[in-house]
Each structure stands twice: as C-alpha cells, then as structure tokens.
Image (tube, rainbow, N blue to C red):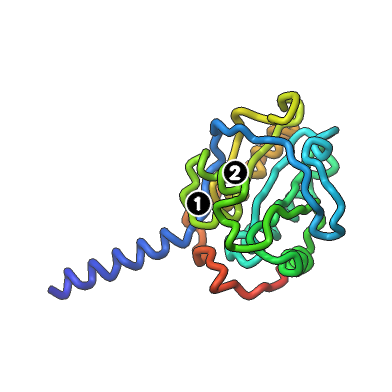
Amino acid sequence: MRFTVAFFLLLAGFVTISAQNEQAPILEKDIVYKDWTLKSIRDGKDINLRDLTKGKKLVAVVYWAPWCHNWQHDAPMLQKLYAKYKDQGFEIVGVGEYGTIDAMKTSLDTFQITFPTVYESQSTADIQKTLHYGYRQATGDRRKWGSPYYVFLTPDRLLKGDRLTEKTDIINGEMIESEGEQMIRMKLKLPPLETKLTSLNQKDNEVCDPAKPAELKKP
C-alpha cells in the first residue's frame, strides 16, 4: 500500500511539473499567416508587418500576455538575442494579447524591451476572438492561452499580397534558447555555435493564468 501511494504521489508530481513546462521545438507547419497593421503599445502609431520585414533576413513574431509566467521567462532572452543580431538582419516584433495597454507597457519597461511591440487584444474575454487564437489552433497549439507563441518569417520567401506565408517555422510555446539562436544564425548565414541544445526539462514555470499573475522582476 505504501509503495502504491508513493508511486501515485510521484506520478502526480511528474505530471504537474510536465504541465508547467511549455518549452517547445521549432517546427515547420502549414499556416496561412497574413499581413497586419496594428497599433504600437508605446505610442499608438500604426506598425505594418510587411514594412518591418523590409531589409531583414529573419523576422520573429512573438505573441505574449503581460501576466504570463512563460512570456516573462522568454522576454529577457529575446531582448538579448535582439541586441546581439539586430544589426545583422534579425528583427523581432511582439504582439501583446489579453492584457491592458498599461500592463503591457509595464512588462516592456521591466524587461527593457527595445524591439517593436504592438497589441491585438486588451482583455482575457477576447481569447477565442483573436487571430492569434486561430493561428495556434492551425498549428496544433492546445495550450489555453498560448503565451508565448512564435511565427518566423523569412522576408525573401514571403508571398505577395495579403498572405505572407502558407508554410513556415513556428514555436507552440517557449523558445529553447540554443535552438532558437542556432536558427537565427543559420538564417543570417553566420557560423553555427558549438553548443548543446538546451533540455526541454531545464526549468519549470507555472502555467499561464491571468488570475495568478507572476511577480514581475527585472532580469
């Protein structure tokens, strides 16, 4: 009996930890990703995605919610990669979701984010109304909130017109830093780094829940 109880407690703990880990690999998926023009979080001006891709070699569109633990894990990593590779043809644009503009601004300030950021929605009630939700469903992301969620665009391969892609690389979760940086370097035609890929189980984050926002801490 003691063995049985201990086994189930161990199993329950494993399931909980696994559920909290939202790191995911980069995968190529069929996705009809469309051009957009959205308002800047910082100043309210229009930002067009296709315009952002001009002169770039790789653009990462990352969807995020300001209260999400998993976004807060990726944010400083993304800023580091952006600072390292922005002058070599890499661009990041963040799309804020499911939070107020003030909360988004606070998150950007906390993590000292300097890449362009826009917003699509401002309420958790919009969860099934956003393009973000539709794209996640199309690429098999079954998380409740889907923060963060990545779509990678290669500018010299974009389609003409409203449709930018019909197939591209995505991440249904947090970025594995070493894998992400290797892809960035490959797209920028830089030598690969001699590093081992980060384990999917390197750390545990709580599952995103707007009712239980994480405490924002400066990196």
Quadrant in which the N terminus appears: bottom left
Number of numbered discs: 2
Contact (Cβ within 8 Å) of mark 2 with mark 1: no
Q: Position of residue 133 (x, y in %)?
A: 57, 48
Q: Position of residue 89 (x, y in %)?
A: 81, 37
Between 6 and 149, the one lying in front of the other is 149
Per the model, the C-alpha gap separating discs 2 and 1 is: 10 Å
Quadrant in which the C terminus appears: bottom right
Q: Which residue is mark 2?
A: 179
Residue 199: give its label: 1
At 42% across and 63% down in the image, what residue appears?
Answer: 17
Rendering quarter of residue 114: bottom right
Along the horizontal axis of the image, is 177 left or right of 38?
A: left
Rendering quarter of residue 50: top right
At 55% across and 33% down in the image, what residue appears?
Answer: 28
In this picture, is 170 found above or below 18?
A: above
Q: Position of residue 56 (x, y in %)?
A: 81, 35
Q: Secondary structure at mark 1?
A: loop
Between 35 and 110, the one lying in front of the other is 35
Between 187 and 146, the one lying in front of the other is 146
At 64% across and 63% down in the image, what residue appears?
Answer: 123
At 68% across and 61% down in the image, what residue appears?
Answer: 122
Residue 87: give its label: none
Dot 2 crowding, Cα within 10 Å, few <14, some 14–19, many 20+: some
The amino acid beneath tag 1 is: Ser
The amino acid beneath tag 2 is: Glu
